[in-house]
Amino acid sequence: MTSPLAGAKEARSEIKKFHVSLNQENLVPEQCHRRNHRNYPMVSYVSQIAALFFSSNYEVIPVFISRTVTELERNADQPVTESYRKIVYEYLCQMTYFLANYTNVDSEKLKCHIPEEIRNAGSRKAPEMDYQT
């Protein structure tokens, strides 16, 4: 049986791999860092989740997961963001799994902000790539 500590380390490691994936130049939607661009909120919310994760400020992450989900839905008609949105969705599932199983974030807060489909998705793997570079 795996210890909870080992499970937390594995979950954190996978999240860090997602962070590398989500910032690949060929994946991030073009011009998304311009404030007036349609994809700016989506990319910004994902970045905010990463910053909160790295600072161990887990309590606020569910709010930004909710905002990101809204943006994923709003941008669903954009084929150019499809690859990015798919990885973001998997990332949100993994982040939620981590929050639910390895932090003290209240389960009611998770239920309030995060859709059931994401809460029940379980652990996810980041896309395969060379994470050393």
Image (cartoon, rainbow, N blue to C red):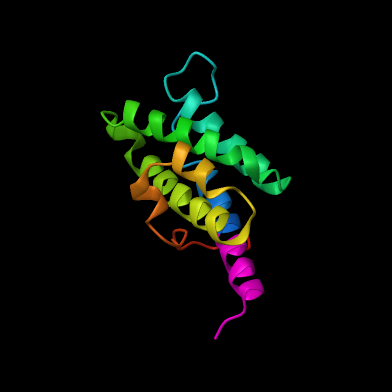
Residue that sits furthest to the front in the current view: 108
Residue 108 in percent (x, y) is at 51, 44
Could you tell whether 10 is left or right of 94 in the image? right
Main SS of residues in magenta: helix
Does the magenta-highlighted stretch encompass residue 16?
A: no
* Residue occupying the point 70% across, 48% down: 54
Quick one: quadrant of the C terminus? bottom right
Question: In the image, which residues are magenta?
Answer: 1-14
* Residue occupying the point 38% across, 56% down: 120
**Nearest to the observer: residue 133 or residue 93:** 93
Residue that sits furthest to the top in the current view: 36
Could you tell whether 123 is left or right of 44 in the image? left
Please say whether residue 75 is visible from this viewpoint: no
**Nearest to the observer: residue 106 or residue 71:** 106
Residue 2 in percent (x, y) is at 57, 82
Residue 70 in percent (x, y) is at 39, 29
Image quadrant in which you'd find residue 5: bottom right
Image quadrant in which you'd find residue 124: bottom left
Please say whether residue 67 is visible from this viewpoint: yes
Figure check: 92 above or below 65: below
Residue 60 in percent (x, y) is at 62, 37
Could you tell whether 86 is left or right of 44 in the image? left
Figure check: 81 above or below 9: above
Does the magenta-highlighted stretch encompass residue 8?
A: yes
Residue that sits furthest to the right in the current view: 55
